[in-house]
Amino acid sequence: MNELCNKERVNVLNQEQRERMSSAQGFIAALDQSGGSTPKALSLYGIDKDKWSNDIEMFALVHEMRTRIITSDAFDGKDIIAAILFAHTMNNEIENRPTAEYLWEEKNIIPILKVDSGLAEEFDGVQLMKPIEKLDQLLMEAKSKGIFGTKMRSVIKTLNIGGIKKVVEQQFKIARHIIQADLVPIIEPEVDIHANNKSQIEDILRSELLYHLDQLGTDAKVMLKLTLPDTRDFYLKCVEHPAVLRVLALSGGYSREESNKRLTEQKGVVASFSRALTEGLKFQQSDEDFNAILKSSIRGIVEASST
């Protein structure tokens, strides 16, 4: 009886979060820097490498940074639809509560988990994902901790049709596995903003995405996280596709100003920024200054996501 009631509560929660994800105003905060990107994130935050001597100390520092952001009054469900977390953050606590629980119950922010294990070496002009170790175990753990969906990233660096096809095929293959675990996957085939022929790469990528979206089952839902394109309303067909719950934009190295400008030209797409979100935040700032900068950053991203 209790098991049945718990299952019903989970189903109600899942539906509530799906509806919020599909239609709420705001954007998705990317707070998922992993082992390879954490040193740069900390450096931008004003903490140099000499402040830690091992990974444990480094991850403790980045968790303090994320906690400061998440607990800020500026960071709440009024403007933030969801937050993408690194596994270390999911397994940690904020104000003595599991992070995912704190986000949803205190902030009304949907928790999402980065599940990829990083990028393989470049081949055919792309970087596929490395094999994801113990994916089933990770998905079960995520589900048990109240995680709604997942995110996984590949990178397209040059115009190579075969490479682009491999990226999209790999993303959708793993996405189907994640859907079977009753989680909603974010598919992220990033296009390097410095790539030659970026617009042509995006033409091929869009075609491949639409092809694979058409192959999904009628009840399957995915999200797409895509580099801000050069053409207005470029991914509108993806936004309108019945298999797509939401299309998100990644800043990909563009400044916040440039990212917001490009985003205003993409109808139905909302931001999922990392560096552009935390731009200007410093460890040394007072809470008053920190919160003011974060509030201003969030306001600008929300406005750009409202097109």
Image (tube, rainbow, N blue to C red):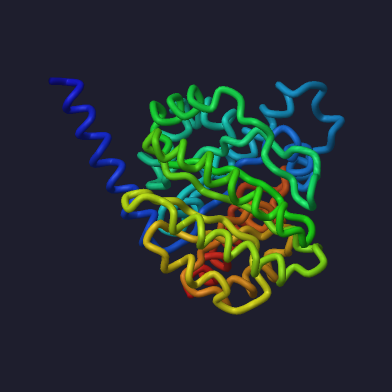
Up the image or down, 39 lies above or below 190; here it is above
Q: Which residue is drawn at the image coordinates 46% and 70% (left, top)?
A: 268
Task: Pick the residue in front: 163 or 156.
Answer: 163
Q: Is residue 193 left or right of residue 76?
A: right
At x 58%, y 65%, the residue is 206
Residue situated in front as seen by the camera: 123 or 275: 123
Coordinates of residue 301 in the picture (x, y in percent): 56, 65
Name the residue at 72% across, 48% down: 282
- Position of residue 290 relative to residue 180, above or below, is below
The one of 111 and 190 positioned closer to us in this rendering: 190
Above or below for 41 versus 191: above
Q: Could you say where residue 250 lies in the image, as x and y percent from the top left? A: 62, 58
Name the one closer to the observer, 278 or 182: 182
Q: Position of residue 166 (x, y in %)?
A: 66, 48
289 with respect to 175 (left or right): right
The image quadrant where one finds the N terminus is top left
